[in-house]
Image: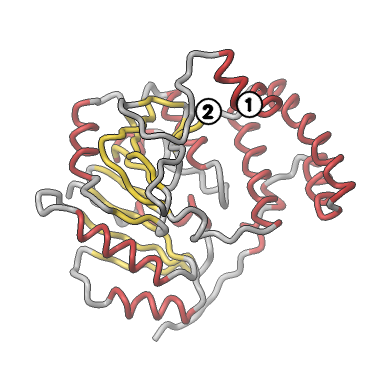
Amino acid sequence: MDVSIISINYNNSQLTLDFVKSVIKHTPSSITFEIIIIDNCSKIEDYNNLKRLLDNFNSNLKIIRSNINTGFGGGNMLGVQHAKGTYLAFINNDILFTEDCFSSLKSFMENNTNTGVATPQQLNRHKKPTSCFDYFHGIRKELFGRWMVELTSKKVKREAKLYQETVCADFIQGCFMFFDAQKFANVGGFDTNVFLYYEEMDICFRLKQNGYSSCLFPATTFIHLHGESTANNYLIKKELQLSKLYIIRKNNLYIKYSIIRSFMLVKFLFKSFFKPKYWSLFFIIITGKYLEHSLKQKQKIEFINSQ
């Protein structure tokens, strides 16, 4: 098996169907692949609809339901347990293929054995290029922004443009990650402590620690219907900050983490005066108990017999 494609469905069965159709349509017979859809404890109506919509596809498609929402990392790691591919493609269900992505990615990985993960060029729904990589969140980036990283380092500038050459970056966007399965295993896969966000920054950091690169390979493109698979609300914004602080604490010296944490305390203190809902986040940062307040702790096991 060349590629195991793993994608998560959460109350978006129609979106998942469109994704699956686009993959099958644009992947040539020269690439052997399987599609593993992890239903992350959707409402039973959506799960049953997903099964009905995908019922007519061939045996290379599996639907695996989790009775608890394990988040991005947990859901994908459940899919890994059923994967057989030489390469693992973790792809959001709000992505559409418009061309063959896997042939060129497979060739690129075979010819660049120091690469652990790659992604094609990302386009938005209007087929305009969007950013595909980012810099690790250190003191410069958190206090001053990306421009300071670009001003004080030789890193390739992060732009919403069509890149003409391969870019090896700190980390690539998590919506489409094409891994060498063995290298993915060598670094331990995704950190399932994280419910949502910054999983890609964490695993690309561990790849780098093991001598592997994370690359944008722009020879092929895909469309990302950005944000359609995840609702945008205060709880999600809070989760983003908690995940970021957990990853920064995990992967950096304590002094570096402390400087970033102090900056975020000041930022959210002032923000709380204008938006009182941020007081809870401010006090969580004071305690340093990030995972304890994650949405992961609020998930319930749903023992539901599907039809």
Considering depth in this image, is 277 or 32 the residue closer to the camera?
277
Q: Is residue 30 above or below residue 267?
A: below
To which residue does mark 2 refer? 135
To which residue does mark 1 refer? 141
Q: Quadrant of the C terminus?
A: bottom left
Position in image of residue 153 (x %, y %): 53, 14
Q: Residue furthest left?
A: 30
- The crowding category of the residue bearing disc 2, from other C-alpha atoms within 10 Å (few below 14, some 14 to 19, many at least 20), is some
Considering depth in this image, is 117 or 142 the residue closer to the camera?
142
Marks 1 and 2, Cα distance to the nearest angstrom?
8 Å
Is there a contact, CB below 8 Å, between mark 1 and mark 2? yes
Q: Is residue 306 above or below residue 144?
A: below
What numbered label is drawn on residue 114? none
First of labels 1, 2 by sequence position = 2
Position in image of residue 202 (x %, y %): 51, 35
User: Disc 2 marks which amino acid?
Assistant: Tyr
Q: Quadrant of residue 108?
A: top left
Residue drawn at x 21%, y 60% is: 24
